[in-house]
Amino acid sequence: MRSFIYVVSALAVMALGFWAYQENYRTQESLRDVARLQRQIGDQRVELTVLRAEWAYLNRPDRLRELADINFDRLGLLPLLPEQFGTVEQVSYPADPLGMITNPVSLVGALAMITQ
């Protein structure tokens, strides 16, 4: 009986060692994946910063005004004037969908009447 316990204990130790070995390699692979993702995130942030800088450079008002002047015959773009903007009073807001509640109904004790 004692030898059976020794054999089962040795097999359990070997099984746990094998499991720990596999978990170690899975953990290392996960850490490599996390490091790769962190590098990708950093690269994407750098690229986003460059794209934002390019967008700001391309949308300079003087450059856009020059492009509008160059392409006036095809586009017909004119500069915006203050008279072209409206006032807040000119904005039509949607009508209030619900009116005032005129005949309120009290539901206090209604559950007690239903269950009787």
Image: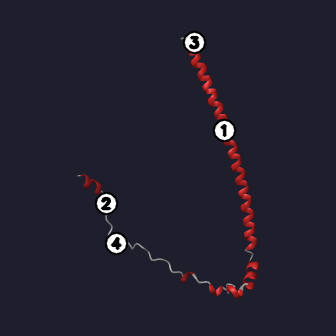
Q: Residue at x 56, y 11 (%)?
A: 2
Q: CA distance from mark 2 to mark 4?
A: 16 Å
* Mark whose residue sits in front, 3 or 4: 3
According to the image, label 2 marks what residue?
107
Q: Earlier in the sequence, mark 4 or mark 1?
A: 1
According to the image, label 1 marks what residue?
27
Of all residues, the one furthest to the left in this rendering is: 116
According to the image, label 4 marks what residue?
102
Identify the secondary structure beneath mark 4: loop
Query: Considering depth in this image, is 85 or 61 the residue closer to the camera?
Result: 61
According to the image, label 3 marks what residue?
3
Q: CA distance from mark 4 to mark 1?
A: 66 Å
* Mark whose residue sits in front, 4 or 1: 1
Crowd class of label 1 (few under 14; some 14 to 19; many from 20; radius 10 Å): few
Q: CA distance from mark 2 to mark 3?
A: 77 Å
Q: Earlier in the sequence, mark 1 or mark 3?
A: 3
* Mark whose residue sits in front, 2 or 1: 1
Disc 2 to disc 3: CB gap under 8 Å: no
Asked whether, in this view, residue 12 is left or right of residue 28, the answer is left
Disc 2 to disc 1: CB gap under 8 Å: no
Identify the secondary structure beneath mark 2: loop
> Where on the picture, by quarter, is residue 56?
bottom right
Q: Position of residue 75 (x, y in %)?
A: 68, 85
Query: Considering depth in this image, is 55 or 82 the residue closer to the camera?
Result: 55
